[in-house]
Image (tube, rainbow, N blue to C red):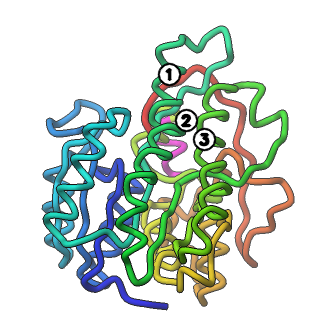
């Protein structure tokens, strides 16, 4: 494993939640440079954090931060954000595609504006951020692209209640397949990371059942730690993988997963898209996620 000291991460949707956890892990462990690329500049009544508060947290953790206002649906904003990052830090070593939108609605309940939002952020945004980071990544010593997207488990059950959302998330994962192949000879690793359980973020609290679901979740720190384990691996040796957080950490010697639980007295809840045949690490028990529909938020 390599260090992220002196390395630069460009993270979309990093003002809160999992994106911020990845930023803080890189900052706290190695003092990395982090570009906080998100569209939240003003406080939101239901969503904690802005690009500026996130940047303050990264600096407090020991890293360098660049808050960048960026809607990843806008090509000009993406190009400008990446160029600003390169101008500030001298390059980009890691691209993390974390920004995402979610609407757990069937075809009749999904309006086309929401469909376009999910496809524009999840699939198109991931492709576009990656596209414009790649020329800089090719100059890096140990370049990685990491998508916060699920294994491509093509089962009807993942599509039937929320076809549009699943298409948009799987679009991110198809970027992993394609770009991993495209960039292998250049030494740029492209991988996906997904949580086994629900993660205690605003999306879960607002969407999947409030406080009860939050207590059945793990904290975002497990994703921060797992992401760190992936992006510090030699890029030429590890690419094209669809990783589950606790399996990544178990392979790296972690045995205590209790510290990631919000409430150890409540059974953990499985996240969407975890394949039925994916076996958790020893001692980890997760209950199936109940069918949920009709809610909308950013993940």
Helix or strand or loop: what does disc 3 sit on? helix
Say if 110 sits above or below 282 in the image. Answer: above
Question: CB under 8 Å between callouts 3 and 1?
Answer: no
Magenta-colored stretch includes residue 102: no
Q: Residue 73, located in which quarter of the rendered image?
A: top left
Span highlighted in magenta in the image: 210-215
Tell me if mark 2 has few (under 14), some (14-19) or many (20+) residues whose alpha carbon lies within 10 angstroms of its own.
Answer: many
Of the residues under marks 1 and 2, which one precedes in the sequence? 1
The answer to whether residue 283 is left or right of residue 75 is: right
Residue position for label 2: 208
Image point 50% across, 22% down: which residue?
116
Between the C-alphas of marks 3 and 1, the distance is 13 Å
Residue sitting nearer the eye, 70 or 84? 84
Say if 133 sits above or below 260 in the image. Answer: above
Residue position for label 3: 169
Q: Tell me, for residue 116, which label it has, or none.
A: 1
Q: Where does the image place residue 266, in percent across and percent down from the top left?
A: 60, 56
Image point 15% across, 64% down: which residue?
87
């Amino acid at each position: 494993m390599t260090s992220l000291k002196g390395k630069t991460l460009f993270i979309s949707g990093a003002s809160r939640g999992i994106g911020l956890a990845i930023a803080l892990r890189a900052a706290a462990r190695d003092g990395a440079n982090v570009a906080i690329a998100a569209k939240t500049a003003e406080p939101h009544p239901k969503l904690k954090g802005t690009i500026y508060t996130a940047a303050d947290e990264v600096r407090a953790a020991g890293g360098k931060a660049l808050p960048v206002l960026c809607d990843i649906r806008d090509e000009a904003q993406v190009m400008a954000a990446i160029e600003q990052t390169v101008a500030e830090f001298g390059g980009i070593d890691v691209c993390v595609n974390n920004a995402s939108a979610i609407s757990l609605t069937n075809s009749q309940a999904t309006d086309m504006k929401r469909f376009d939002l999910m496809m524009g952020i999840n699939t198109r945004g991931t492709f576009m951020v990656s596209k414009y980071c790649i020329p800089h990544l090719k100059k890096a010593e140990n370049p990685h692209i990491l998508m916060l997207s699920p294994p491509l488990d093509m089962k009807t059950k993942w599509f039937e209640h929320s076809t549009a959302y699943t298409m948009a998330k799987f679009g991110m994962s198809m970027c992993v397949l394609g770009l991993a192949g495209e960039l292998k000879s250049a030494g740029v690793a492209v991988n996906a990371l997904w949580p086994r359980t629900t993660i205690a973020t605003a999306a879960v609290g607002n969407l999947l059942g409030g406080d009860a679901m939050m207590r059945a979740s793990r904290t975002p720190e497990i994703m921060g730690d797992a992401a760190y384990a992936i992006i510090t691996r030699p890029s030429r040796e590890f690419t094209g993988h669809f990783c589950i957080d606790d399996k990544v950490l178990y392979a790296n010697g972690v045995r205590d997963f209790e510290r990631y639980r919000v409430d150890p007295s409540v059974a953990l809840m499985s996240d969407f898209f975890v394949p039925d045949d994916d076996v958790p690490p020893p001692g980890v028990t997760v209950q199936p996620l109940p069918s949920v529909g009709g809610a909308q938020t950013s993940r």
